């Protein structure tokens, strides 16, 4: 089944013009300077504090660090984070 998914996904992206982030289950991060981060296609919160946000994704985790974090919006697959962002890391599953 996994091989079939690896073959069909590129075809869907190319011939049906579907967004690759949706088909490949990749997160989409939109940042405005160091003050806002809008994250789509995540699978839930792993860690949250005023200095760190760690989100589960299909391929691992997204870790955002900084200061004065506030979750301005939280939907099932979307989050808007506000604060001073100093670092964004992608951490693969081990």
Image (cartoon, grey):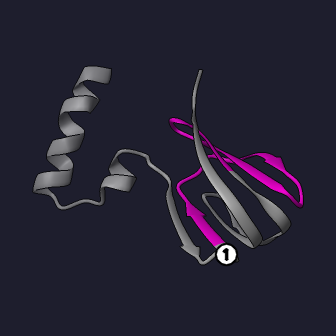
Q: Is 22 on the left or on the right of 94, as rendered?
A: left
Residue 12 is situated, as x and y percent measured from the top left of the image, at: 19, 49
Q: Looking at the image, which residue is at 23% across and 26% down?
A: 4
Crowdedness near tag 1: few (<14), some (14–19) or many (≥20) residues, C-alpha within 10 Å: some
Q: Looking at the image, which residue is at 38% across and 54% down?
A: 22
Residue in the foreground of this view, choosing between 84 and 79? 84
Q: Looking at the image, which residue is at 24% across and 41% down?
A: 9
Q: Is 2 on the left or on the right of 88, as rendered?
A: left
- Element at label 1: strand
Q: Is residue 27 magenta?
A: no
- Vertical arrangement, residue 15 with respect to residue 80, above or below: above
Q: Is 52 on the left or on the right of 43, as rendered?
A: right
Quadrant placement of the N terminus: top left
Residue 65 is situated, as x and y percent measured from the top left of the image, at: 75, 55
Q: Looking at the image, which residue is at 76% across and 53% down?
A: 53
In the image, which residues are magenta? 37-63
Q: Can the viewer see residue 1?
A: no
- Vertical arrangement, residue 41 with respect to residue 31, above or below: above
Instruction: Find disc 1 in the rendering and name its residue.
Output: 36
Principal secondary structure, stretch drawn in magenta? strand
Residue 5 is situated, as x and y percent measured from the top left of the image, at: 27, 31
Q: Is residue 41 magenta?
A: yes
- Vertical arrangement, residue 61 with respect to residue 26, above or below: above
Q: Can the viewer see residue 27?
A: yes
Residue 61 is situated, as x and y percent measured from the top left of the image, at: 62, 40
Quadrant placement of the C terminus: top right
């Amino acid at each position: 089944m996994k091989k079939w998914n690896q073959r069909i996904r590129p075809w869907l992206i190319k011939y049906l013009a579907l967004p690759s982030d949706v088909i490949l289950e990749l997160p989409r991060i939109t940042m405005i300077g160091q003050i806002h981060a809008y994250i789509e296609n995540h699978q839930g919160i792993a860690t949250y504090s005023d200095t760190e946000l760690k989100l589960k994704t299909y391929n691992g985790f997204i870790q955002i660090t900084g200061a004065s974090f506030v979750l301005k919006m939280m939907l099932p697959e979307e989050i808007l984070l506000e604060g001073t962002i100093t670092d964004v890391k992608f951490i693969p599953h081990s």
